[in-house]
Amino acid sequence: MSAKPTTGSRPDFRQLRALPRERWPRREQILFEAASQFAQRGYHGTSTRDIADALGIRQPSLYNHYPSKLAILEDLCAYDIGVPGERARWISRVDAPASARLYAAVRLDVEYCLEAPIDMRGLPDDLIGEPGLETWNRKLRAWYATVRAIVREGVEAGELAPIDPEFARQAIWGVEWEVIRVSHGGRRRRAGTRPDDVASFVLRGLLADPSRVGEAREAAAGVIAAYRAAHPG
Amino acid sequence: MSAKPTTGSRPDFRQLRALPRERWPRREQILFEAASQFAQRGYHGTSTRDIADALGIRQPSLYNHYPSKLAILEDLCAYDIGVPGERARWISRVDAPASARLYAAVRLDVEYCLEAPIDMRGLPDDLIGEPGLETWNRKLRAWYATVRAIVREGVEAGELAPIDPEFARQAIWGVEWEVIRVSHGGRRRRAGTRPDDVASFVLRGLLADPSRVGEAREAAAGVIAAYRAAHPG
DNA sequence: CCTACCGATCGGTAGG
DNA sequence: CCTACCGATCGGTAGG
């Protein structure tokens, strides 16, 4: 009844990281717990009572903050799909070589997920078929298309080896996802070398001349700086 | 009561592929349906009634073939973890360069999953934490360790770039997994070029000199031939 | 945020 | 392989 609408402003991660978890708004506490438990036992394997118990409240009290279990999952999609998808789109339009844009997009994806205050593993791919998630499914596919488009440009420019853009998308996505999964998103605050590890590995696999990874990395620094300037936080 | 024990001989995939699905043993029909539905909606998102309905039988009849829902999942693990894990172990011991063994292992993994008559996407990583799956969890970790060991040998021999073996394992696993996931395991009978695509991509990312992928691929042909000779089917 | 409670569905059993 | 049925748990509501 008094549940706030799902489609609203997202509190940014900087604000949350600055506070101890007990002082987060209750809604974000619920999101954190749900993300953590969905990541461990899956959406269907986690009950609303599990989430409430972890927060020390009764199960029906959740419904003062979210109108349904699905609404929690939709909120997670905003972080797991919405933010990175919009970022990829922004980066795809920067005036820079495709290899630099790819490096930048991959690196920022991994950094974002590893430094996020909530667990970003909560959205296994089988879940996106859930009834009610059609909108997020479309956004995910749009994200895929953006990555393929950058790869295609790189192949046409001769920067990248002549590779199937959809295969490249799968390879990029797979490496990103497994690294994020293993790194237990939401626990660490510093991403370490993994974002560069992933972006460099992927570029070595895609570049027509793999010895030019260093070049792409340097060009990507400008893309990343531009993105950060345009998106503080 | 009359359910056959879970730990038994696995019918091999050649036998199943030779028959239309209606003539498969009922137990394998159940496995096929479960694999397909687990892959689409997850283990917890699939009910035993869903599986029975798809087979045109009543839900309690399943229990004549499997003692529990978990036992079906355990059987799937034998295909998704047992077979590839044992294969990786066999290949790791072949007398060949590490890069050739890596190429062979990756290529055979992808080929196996894409040509399997059942859907190999049914085992998302969050599921392996399920109570009762501890044995398979251990085997999965042993598989991980085997891959890391091959990478370590390759790095020490100077074949591979000085890369963290665990990161290499994550990269390999991630690409394999995403390609298998997208390819809707169990539908196709011919794997096409994907097994080579994946193995080559991964090797370009790992080799000290990425231009030597062709060399590794040729050396891997011998490893693959040896494996197939020792494991008909 | 609570207690009390709802109908639906879950995995599994009994007995034939 | 069936019908009949079990206790447990599910997401969600009513009403305060």
Image: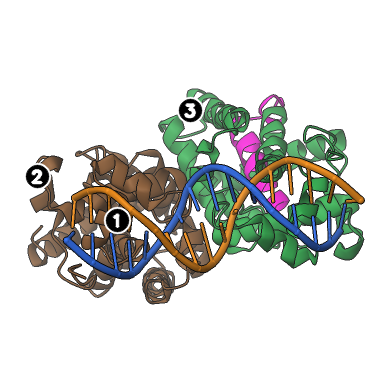
Chain colours: A green, B brown, C blue, D orange
Q: What is the quadrant of residue B182 in the picture?
A: top left
Residue type indicated by callout 3: Val
Q: Secondary structure at mark 3?
A: helix
Mark 3 vs mark 2, foreground winner is 2
User: Which residue does the image show at 30% across and 68% down from the upper left?
Assistant: B85
Q: Nearer the viewer, residue B112 or A60?
A: A60
Relative image position of residue A181 (x, y in whole percent): 57, 58
- On-image quarter of the N terminus of chain A: top right
Q: CA distance from mark 3 to mark 1?
A: 55 Å
First to last magenta residue range? A91-116
- Residue that mark 2 sits on: B23
Relative image position of residue A11 (x, y in whole percent): 86, 44
Q: Chain of mark 2?
A: B
Q: Secondary structure at mark 1?
A: helix
Q: Which mark is residue B177?
A: none
**Does B103 appear in magenta?**
no
Residue type indicated by callout 1: Pro
Whether labels 3 and 1 share one chain: no
Relative image position of residue A131 (x, y in whole percent): 54, 34
Q: Chain of mark 1?
A: B
Q: What is the quadrant of residue B80 in the picture?
A: bottom left
Residue type indicated by callout 2: Arg
User: Which residue does the image show at 31% across and 57% down from the upper left?
Assistant: B103
Instruction: Give the dominant element type of the magenta stretch: helix, strand or loop.
Output: helix
Is residue A185 in view from this perspective? no
Q: CA distance from mark 3 to mark 2?
A: 47 Å
- Residue that mark 1 sits on: B60
- Residue that mark 3 sits on: A155
Mark 1 vs mark 2, foreground winner is 1
User: Which residue does the image show at 24% across and 55% down from the upper left?
Assistant: B61
